[in-house]
Image (tube, rainbow, N blue to C red):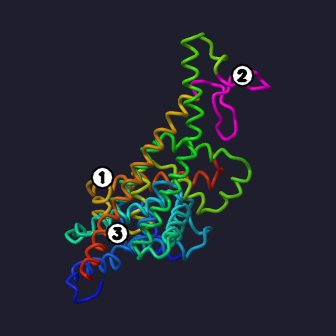
Amino acid sequence: MGPGNGNEDESMTYQEFNREIVPLKDKLYRCALAILGNRMDAEDILQDTYGKLWTLREKLDSLDNREAYAMRMVRNLCLDQLRAHRLHEDKLEEVFNHRTEEGPGQQEDLKDMDAVVKRVIAQLPEKPRTVIHLRDVEGYEMDEIAAIVGDDPATVRVTLSRARKTVREKVINIMNYGLR
Amino acid sequence: MAYDNMQELERLTSLYLEGESTLEEETRLRELLASLPDSALTPEQQSVKAMLGCFVRMAREEAPVEDIALMPRVRMEALRRSLWRQVASVAAVAVLGIFIGSTLALRQDKGSSGTIEATARIAPTTGDPVYGYINGQPVTDANVAVRQSEEVLRSMGMQMNKSAGYLSSFDGPMERVSAALTNMK
C-alpha cells in the first residue's frame, strides 16, 4: 500500500500504530505478568491485547492517553482470564502460600532479595499489586494510574501506601526471621 | 553518612511509604540508598532499598515477542495458538467421550438394575468401577467423572468462542484483498 493509491489515511494509521502502540509491548507484558504471575498467560494476553488494539485503531486516534487505554485493556483482559480460570484472590493466595511452604530448595532461591520482593508482591491482592507495579516499576503518575485502575488519585495514593508498607514489613520479617 | 544526607534519606523514605513522594523524589531516594552499604541503613531502609532495586530490574524485563510490528504475523501467531487449542480440544473430546459414555451407561444401568458396578468397566487389580482416565489414572468416582465431563465441555466452549473471534478478524483484510484484485482487472 503506497502513496498515491487513495489509501494514505489507512497507511498513516498503520504507521502510527507501529510508532505509538507497538513500543508499549514491554510495559503491557510486564503489567500482565504482574497481575497473572505466569509468563505464558502474560504472552497470551499481550497477543490478545494487540489484536484488539489493532481492531480498535480508529478509536485510538481520538484518545488523549493511548498508553493508559492500552494498559487498562491489559488489566481488564487479565481480570477476565482470572475469572475464567476461577483463580480468585483466595485461590491465588492459597497457591502462593503453598509455594512458600516448600522445602529447602525454595529457601535457597529466596536468598535472592529480588525473589523475596517479587514473592511478597505476588501475595498482595490484585489491585494493590497492579498499583505498586504501575508506580514503582513503570513510573506512572497518580492520575494515570487512577485512569487505568478506575479509582480516583487519592484512593490510588492510599492503596499504594498500604501496598508499600505491607511489602516493606514482610521483607523486613523475611530478612530478620526467614520465611514464615 | 553526612547528617544532611541522613535527614534527606529519612524524609524521602517517609514520603515514599506514605505514597506522597513525586517520581523525582523516588529517583533521588533510590540513588541515595544505592550509594550506601546495607550496614549503614536501618532495617526499614534496607527493605526499601531491596524493593527499589528489584523494581529497577523488573522494569528491564522485555516481552518475549519478536516482530510484533508485523501485525499479520502477530495475528497468525494468535491463530496458530488457537489452532493448537483446537487440537487439544479434539483430544479432550476423546476423553469426554469416555466420560459421557461411562456416565450414560451409568445412568442407563441405574434405571435398569440400580447398580453402578454392573455398567462401568471394572479395574482388574482393584475390582473398582472405572469411568475414564485423567492423566493415565483411572477415575473410579462417578461424581469426579461427571465434574470432569462438565469441565471439558466448559473449556471447549471457551476455546471455540475465542477461535471464532480470531477468524472474524480476517474479514477486513480479505475484503481489501478482494477490492485490490478487482481494481487490477
Q: Residue at image x 54%, y 12%?
A: B111
Q: Residue type at mark 2?
A: Asp
Q: Residue at image x 32%, y 61%?
A: A145
Q: Residue type at mark 1?
A: Thr
Q: Secondary structure at mark 3?
A: loop
**Is there CB contact under 8 Å for labels 1 and 3?**
no
Circle 3 residue: B22
**Are labels 1 and 3 assigned to the same chain?**
no
Q: CA distance from mark 1 to mark 3?
A: 16 Å
Magenta-highlighted residues: B120-144
Circle 2 residue: B128
Mark 3 burial class by Cα count in 10 Å: few <14, some 14-19, many 20+:
some
Check the image and report above or below for A109 versus A3. above
In the picture, the quarter occupied by the C terminus of chain B is bottom left
Q: Which of the chains bears the disc numbered 3?
A: B
Circle 1 residue: A155
Which percent across, then down, holds residue A130? 41, 56
Question: Residue B131: within the magenta?
Answer: yes
- Comparing A171 with B106, the one in front is B106
Q: Please identify the residue farthest to the right as the structure is shown.
A: B125
Mark 2 burial class by Cα count in 10 Å: few <14, some 14-19, many 20+:
some
Residue A87 visible here: no
Q: Which of the chains bears the disc numbered 2?
A: B
Q: Secondary structure at mark 2?
A: loop
Q: Residue at image x 66%, y 44%?
A: A101
Q: CA distance from mark 3 to mark 2?
A: 67 Å
